[in-house]
Amino acid sequence: MGLTPWCRRIWPGLLRRRRARTREKLLRFLDEVFPGEGSAIAKEKLKLIILGVLLQHADHERIIVCARRRGIGDDRARQFLRGEVTSGFRREMLAGLLDGCGADPVGIEVALELFDELIREEPMPDPPPSAPAASPAASPAASEAGDAVVTGSASQDHDHDGSSEPAASPGPALHAGPGSPGPAGLKPDPSTATTFAELMALLPAYRVWTGERSYRKMAAAIDYRFAHNTLSSLHNRTTRAKLDLLLAFVEGCGGDAADVEQWKQAWQRIALSDATRRHEAQEDDLPVLPE
């Protein structure tokens, strides 16, 4: 027996609420077991999720076989069985292994968020030292030309205090430092979004631009109107989020009144566009009455 029209209308909402409750419970459990934040905490939380999935899927040899079918080597599969998935792992590799073990979609979602956090905070390796290049022998004419260029450059770069060392010009950065907003030209613009998914996808870049506060500091900045777990998962939404939650995220990042108003107008514009489309679709579905 199929679902009635009324059930079909309410069923997606019920599933979304159930998924949200499951996510909140999982995040709360992880915070209770490993309180705090940082890459070390995220690593332990991710390991706990993987081991919890593996407890329900005890046939490790079958996992290795499934990994081979997905093009994943045995070494990476055994690394996954130990819960160690940072070094040499890719995002799609982790998602495939968790899905092959029958992990819950919410668990996969949270695991990938933790994995992204680990990759983002993983220190970059130091570049190898480069040996100075030997200067080739030059002709007298070339040597004189080179001396002229160096002399002219030195005279142009000479400071008032007598220093002849030219000042280095920094390249563009998304933000100047912790707690400092970045250049105005790199600021994410919510007015470019045409859907709520696009609007939510701009939030991580805005957080980085404003100085990349931790989500716990963001929650404290808004007087804990929303939990840090709720703020950290907002950018993953593809449907409309509540306006007060979106504005709380902007405020928590350190956005000023102008930024809050800009994000508010973007939310209202997209919400109005969605409502107009739904109304037009309902009118198209109305039966045509005979004249």
Image (cartoon, rainbow, N blue to C red):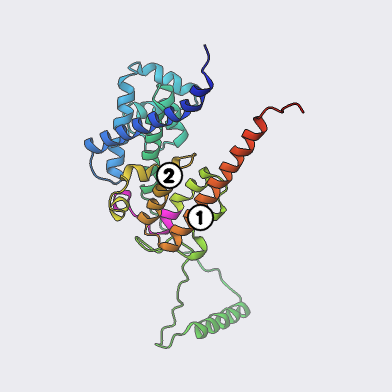
> In the image, what residue occupies the spot 53% across and 46% down?
271
The magenta-colored residue range is 206-217
From where the camera sits, is residue 73 visible?
no
- The circle drawn on residue 265 is 1
> Looking at the rendering, which quadrant does residue 252 occupy?
bottom left
Expressed as whole percent of the image width and height from the top left, the position of residue 221 reads 30, 55
The answer to which of marks 1 and 2 sits earlier in the sequence is 2
Is 54 above or below relative to 239?
above
> In the image, what residue occupies the spot 35% across and 42% down?
230
Expressed as whole percent of the image width and height from the top left, the position of residue 71 reads 50, 26
Expressed as whole percent of the image width and height from the top left, the position of residue 118 reads 36, 43
Is 113 above or below relative to 9?
below
Q: Secondary structure at mark 2?
A: loop
Of the pair 222 and 276, the residue shown nearer to us: 276
- Magenta stretch: includes residue 211: yes
Crowdedness near tag 1: few (<14), some (14–19) or many (≥20) residues, C-alpha within 10 Å? some
Of the pair 132 and 165, the residue shown nearer to us: 165
Q: How many labels sit on residues?
A: 2
Of the pair 282 and 55, the residue shown nearer to us: 282
| Residue with the most extreme top position | 1
From where the camera sits, is residue 224 visible?
yes
Question: Quick one: quadrant of the C terminus?
Answer: top right
- Give the labeled residue for mark 2: 242
Is 196 above or below relative to 174?
above
- The circle drawn on residue 178 is none
* Residue 237 located left or right of residue 148: left
> In the image, what residue occupies the spot 33% across and 42% down?
229
